[in-house]
Image (tube, rainbow, N blue to C red):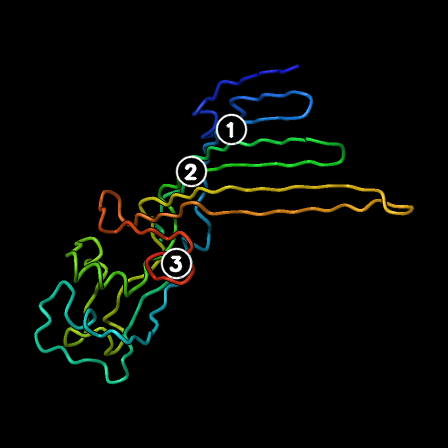
């Protein structure tokens, strides 16, 4: 016996209430398949808006973009003797809410008594993702691609430097990125068996990331980065 049911999706309702509405459900005696589409709009967190701004000196081993890029002609800008340069961190009251489209397809099967196996494929497309852009990424993109949006975040101070006092810095406050896309597969299994006077439950859960892609600036493909499997890269982690 196979049962098929469906539900219509209302984007306006999703915007207001964030429902998890199954588009299609298929059931029989041993298997259930579910397809879902969810739209979510997340409010901007208080800390992202109002976190206190602070200028912090950061060490760097690559001084070339620090000295040679920015809105002003560098001329004879003196390098920092300590190889430390200023970055501005903090909140941003001009942030927009994040929004996400989530699609998932899952199958739950019980091929034998006491055994349950599930497989889920999911994709998430996040727009206006709230994060930060690392100072080095800002400098490098400005130098190599003449990205005006990122070049505008470089504020040269005394004598055109980014280290004398606190008037010069690279602004790395919270911002809305262009897009962040994820996809992956989740697998789980559970099996129960009688052991002496009790029951032994065995469970397995695994997840595989298939895609993690970041577009820092909307419409600028030079700021698109493949971040799948990368945990410590300034282009991916901010």
Q: Earlier in the sequence, mark 2 or mark 3?
A: 2
Q: CA distance from mark 3 to mark 1?
A: 29 Å
Helix, strand, or loop for circle 3? helix
Tell me which residue sits at (23%, 79%) in the image. 164
- Residue 237 shows which numbered tag? 3
- Mark 2 residue element: strand
Residue at 21 percent of width and 59 percent of height: 141
Label 2 CA crowd tier, 10 Å (few <14, some 14–19, many 20+): some
Identify whether 21 is placed above or below 145.
Answer: above
Q: Which residue is mark 1?
A: 36
Secondary structure of the residue carrying tag 1 is: strand
Q: Where residue 225 appears, x then y in whole percent?
A: 31, 52
> Few, some or many C-alpha atoms within 10 Å of disc 3 (few <14, some 14-19, many ≥20)?
some
Is the C-beta separation of discs 2 and 1 under 8 Å?
Answer: no
- Numbered circles on residues, count: 3
Q: Which mark is residue 100?
A: 2
Image height of 56 relative to 23, above or below: below
Q: Nearer the viewer, residue 128 or 120?
A: 120
Label of residue 177 in the image: none
Disc 2 to disc 3, C-alpha distance: 19 Å
Q: Earlier in the sequence, mark 2 or mark 1?
A: 1
User: Which one is in front, 107 or 11?
Assistant: 107
Q: Could you tell whether 207 is left or right of 2 in the image? A: left
On the rendered structure, is 119 left or right of 110? left
Instruction: Please tell me in which quadrant of the rendered image residue 219 appears.
Output: top left
- Find residue 151 and report its image quarter: bottom left
């Amino acid at each position: 016996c196979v049962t098929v049911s469906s539900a219509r999706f209302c984007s306006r309702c999703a915007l207001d209430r964030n429902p998890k509405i199954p588009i299609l459900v298929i059931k029989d005696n041993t298997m259930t398949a579910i397809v879902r589409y969810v739209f979510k709009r997340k409010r901007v967190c208080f800390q992202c808006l109002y976190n206190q701004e602070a200028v912090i000196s950061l060490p760097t081993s690559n001084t070339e973009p620090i000295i040679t890029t920015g809105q002003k002609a560098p001329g004879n800008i003196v390098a920092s003797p300590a190889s430390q340069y200023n970055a501005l961190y903090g909140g941003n009251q001009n942030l927009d809410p994040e929004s996400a489209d989530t699609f998932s397809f899952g199958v739950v099967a019980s091929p034998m008594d006491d055994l349950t196996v599930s497989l889920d494929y999911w994709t998430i497309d996040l727009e206006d993702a709230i994060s930060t852009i690392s100072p080095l990424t800002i400098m490098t993109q400005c130098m190599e691609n003449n990205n005006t949006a990122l070049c505008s975040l470089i504020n040269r101070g005394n004598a055109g430097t980014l280290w004398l006092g606190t008037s010069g810095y690279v602004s790395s406050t919270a911002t809305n990125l262009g897009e962040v896309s994820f996809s992956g597969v989740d697998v789980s299994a559970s099996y129960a068996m009688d052991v002496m006077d009790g029951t032994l439950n065995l469970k397995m859960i695994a997840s595989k990331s298939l895609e993690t892609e970041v577009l820092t600036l909307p419409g600028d493909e030079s700021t698109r980065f493949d971040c799948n499997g990368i945990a410590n890269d300034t282009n991916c982690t901010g």
